[in-house]
Amino acid sequence: MVESNTADEPEVRKFRTLFLSDIHLGTRGCQAELLIDFLRHHDADKIYLVGDIIDGWRLKKTWYWPQSHNDVVQKILRKGRKGASITYLPGNHDEFLRDYLGTHFGGVEVVDSAIHITADGKRYLVIHGDQFDVVVRHAKWLALLGDWAYVTALAMNTWVNIVRRKLGLTYWSLSAWAKLKVKNAVSFIGKFEIALASEAKRRGADGVVCGHIHHAVIHDMHGTHYVNTGDWVESCTAVGEHEDGTLELIRWTRVLQKPETTVAPATERAQAA
């Protein structure tokens, strides 16, 4: 457990690389305040934004962009101005950016996929992952229907966490819990992982770093190193690469006992067995 000394001078953990995905800026489910706090406490030489950073699907229907979402963008761009290399790999919710592959915006490079080489020489395919989701690829109307159901679940989740905050408890995701209790959802996750692991092997990579399914995990179950960064709607997770090449799954929560209470982040090291 790492605690900041003061609100103005947080203790910063420095990584070689940070991987973030599925922030879904532009939605009410986005945990922007937690992400801003995470970015205050974490820094890296290179940052990968692994898709669905902005939720174009929701913004097309209803415009929602509070100051905290703008602050997230400014916080990331500020890291770029301070020297961090930033690569943006669009997902299905921010697919409009795929029209700009190979370009730079404010120092942010936009690419479809990338090969990241860790400090210990391992090659990782970095990709959002929606390209391997048959529902998104072949039945977008069904994906949009699922998105509506997901937003409804997140609305319920908001009320659950209002009660939890009043009790001084950390953020908890009702939708993430339900996802792991539904047999078909668990089966889909497994098939998705196998598809991404196979693609990594096809490209001659040692592993894959992806997002899309909002299920943060690091494992070697499918014959390659599979890394999913999770999201900033349900799990509030990111993946950091240490200077020795080790990958760490970071879970970021906040205990709210008083309005002035300092942040109490929690980190979880998850390495391949």
Image (cartoon, rainbow, N blue to C red):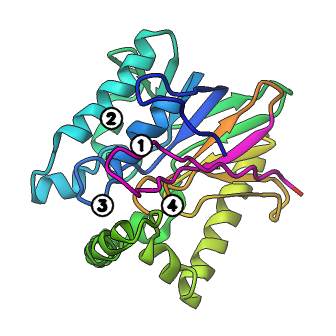
Count of labels shown?
Answer: 4
Q: Magenta stretch containing residue 271, yes or no?
A: yes
Q: CA distance from mark 3 to mark 1?
A: 12 Å
Q: Residue 37, relative to residue 138: is it above or below?
A: above
Q: Main secondary structure of the magenta part?
A: loop
Q: Which of the two labelled residues, at mark 2 and mark 3, occupies the earlier sequence position? A: 3
Q: Which of the two labelled residues, at mark 1 and mark 2, occupies the earlier sequence position? A: 1
- In percent of the image, x 67 and y 40: which residue is there? 125
Q: Magenta stretch containing residue 260, yes or no?
A: yes
| Residue 196 picture quarter | bottom right
Which three-letter amino acid code belongs to the residue tagged 4? Ser
Task: Look at the image and tell me whether residue 269 can be seen.
Answer: yes
Whether the residues at callouts 1 and 2 have beta carbons within 8 Å, the answer is: yes
Q: Which of the two labelled residues, at mark 3 and mark 4, occupies the earlier sequence position? A: 3
Q: Which residue is mark 2?
A: 72
Q: Which of the two labelled residues, at mark 1 and mark 4, occupies the earlier sequence position? A: 1
Number of other residues with Cα within 10 Å of mark 4, as a class: few under 14, some 14 to 19, many 20 or more: many
Q: Residue 165, relative to residue 88: is it above or below?
A: below
Number of other residues with Cα within 10 Å of mark 1, as a class: few under 14, some 14 to 19, many 20 or more: many
Q: Secondary structure at mark 4?
A: loop
Q: Position of residue 241 (x, y in %)?
A: 71, 33
Q: CA distance from mark 2 to mark 3?
A: 14 Å
Q: Which residue is mark 4?
A: 235
Q: Which residue is mark 3?
A: 29
Which three-letter amino acid code belongs to the residue tagged 2? Val
- In percent of the image, x 40 and y 56: which residue is there? 256
Which three-letter amino acid code belongs to the residue tagged 3? Gly
Q: Position of residue 90 (x, y in %)?
A: 41, 41
Q: CA distance from mark 1 to mark 4?
A: 11 Å
Q: Which of the two labelled residues, at mark 2 and mark 4, occupies the earlier sequence position? A: 2
Q: Which residue is mark 1?
A: 35
